[in-house]
Image (cartoon, grey):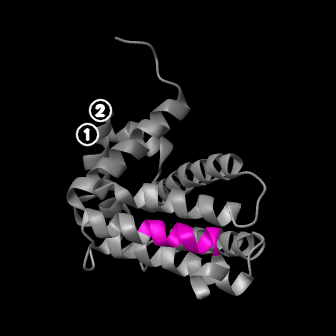
Amino acid sequence: MGPQRTDLRTRDLILEACSQILRREGLTNLTLKAVAEEAGISKGGLLYHFPNKVSLIETLFKYHNDKFEARLQELAKIEGDVPGAWLRAYARASIEQIADPGNASLYASIFAAEDRYATAHQLMRQKYTLWQKQVEECGLNPDWATLVRFAVDGLWFSEMHRYAPLSTTRHEKIVDLILELIDDPKGALD
């Protein structure tokens, strides 16, 4: 028997197992039994951490939001304190996140279950409200910055749902255009 896992490590293991099932098989095949097997723990062990599927999905949503938020803050720090820096970090973090087809299917599965997991979606709505406030305060014209955020989100949702996904070349050009809109908003209007 290896070193004993901490509760936090076991919790993360369960969340990663849940994520893998959603990436591979979607929400319809997500059961507590399947998550326990994927994580290599007993169903009782899973229930110790998550008493039901709703608590698991809500925590999974928060887990991935926290990972995104950490990356967003890391990129914002790199961008510095110039106009549009936070929006550029948001664009880069969003594009990085959805570029992985596994993440796209993960989020598509979670978003598809809004009726069943409304609390998880409420957490996402709260995040978007905070992010929109930061978009509006990023040093660019708030209307322009919001338009750019909508372009980023549109690309994200298109990739997530596989709605007319772009070729790699076109995807790269669109990303470059989005970043150009942030870096040179006046030039983009000419």
Whole-percent x and y of residue 38?
27, 40
Whole-percent x and y of residue 69?
61, 54
The residue that appears at 47% across and 23% down in the rendered structure is 5
The residue that appears at 55% across and 34% down in the rendered structure is 8
Q: Nearer the viewer, residue 145 or 120?
A: 145
Report the predominant secondary structure element of the magenta stretch.
helix
**Mark 2 residue crowding within 10 angstroms, few (<14) / some (14–19) / many (20+):** some
Q: How many marks?
A: 2
Q: Nearer the viewer, residue 1 or 27?
A: 27
What segment is highlighted magenta in the picture? Answer: 175-184
Residue 178 is inside the magenta segment: yes
The residue that appears at 52% across and 58% down in the rendered structure is 92
Up/down of 5 relative to 101, above or below: above
- Side (left or right) of 136 relative to 144: right
Q: Quadrant of residue 143?
A: bottom right
- Cα–Cα span, label 1 and label 2: 5 Å
- Side (left or right) of 102 relative to 173: left
Q: Amino acid at mark 2?
A: Gly
Q: Quadrant of residue 26?
A: bottom left
**Mark 1 residue crowding within 10 angstroms, few (<14) / some (14–19) / many (20+):** some
Residue picked out by circle 1:
37
Q: Nearer the viewer, residue 43 or 121?
A: 121
Up/down of 113 relative to 7, above or below: below
Q: Can residue 65 be seen by looking at this rendering?
A: yes
Q: Amino acid at mark 1?
A: Glu
- Side (left or right) of 80 relative to 182: right
Element on which disc 2 rests: loop
Quarter of the image where the C terminus is located: bottom right
Residue 183 is inside the magenta segment: yes
Up/down of 184 relative to 81, above or below: below
Whether pointer 1 and pointer 2 mark residues with C-beta atoms closer than 8 Å, the reply is yes
Residue picked out by circle 2:
40
